[in-house]
Image (tube, rainbow, N blue to C red):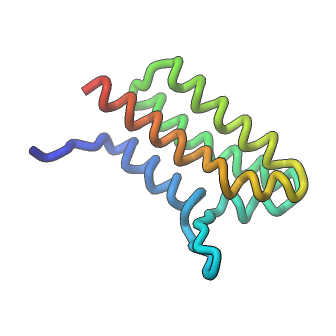
Amino acid sequence: MTETVPPGLRRARRVATLLDDAVTIPVVNVKVGLDSLIGLLPLSGDLAAGLLSLYIVFEAARSGVPRTVLAWMLFNVAVDTVVGSVPVVGDLFDVVWKANRRNVTLFERAVDADG
């Protein structure tokens, strides 16, 4: 049986990969994305990354994901943006937290539960 993936989920997965897992750092073998790299810019970088992260929430909302799931997704983005804005600690947090991956997982579960 072929899995039918909604186009919004497919786009959200690509954005999450770009933001959280685009590049593997050699030697330590840790994946980072634009979220971590943009977040190196004090405050403005974290706000920009937070705005980009909202795209995944937008796609989930367009796909009919329940409001409770959208609220958790917004919580993940808020935590990533606020904690990520703390110098040094926030940059390390961005590498580990991966709010966009978390949100895609929530999106996937909501779609699976619906279908």
Q: Where is residue 47 in the image (x, y as percent from the top left)?
A: 78, 47
Relative to 110, residue 93 above or below: below
Q: In which quarter of the image is the N terminus?
A: top left
Quadrant assignment, res 40: bottom right
Name the residue nearer the viewer: 64 or 114: 114
Name the residue nearer the viewer: 89 or 75: 89
Q: Which residue lies furthest to the left in this view?
A: 1
Relative to 78, residue 22 above or below: below
User: At 24% across and 27% down in the image, what residue appears?
Assistant: 115
Relative to 36, residue 12 above or below: above
User: At 51% across and 54% down in the image, what residue appears?
Assistant: 15
**In the displayed structure, does residue 97 sit left or right of residue 3?**
right
Q: Where is residue 53 in the image (x, y as percent from the top left)?
A: 62, 45
Q: Position of residue 81 (x, y in %)?
A: 76, 43
Name the residue nearer the viewer: 58 or 82: 82
Relative to 86, residue 75 above or below: above
Q: How many marks?
A: 0
Quadrant assignment, res 14: bottom left
**In the displayed structure, does residue 49 sit left or right of residue 56?**
right
User: At 63% across and 75% down in the image, what residue appears?
Assistant: 25
Q: Position of residue 79 (x, y in %)?
A: 73, 37
**In the displayed structure, does residue 41 sit left or right of residue 30?**
right
Q: Which residue lies furthest to the bottom in this view?
A: 27
User: At 64% across and 36% down in the image, what residue appears?
Assistant: 76
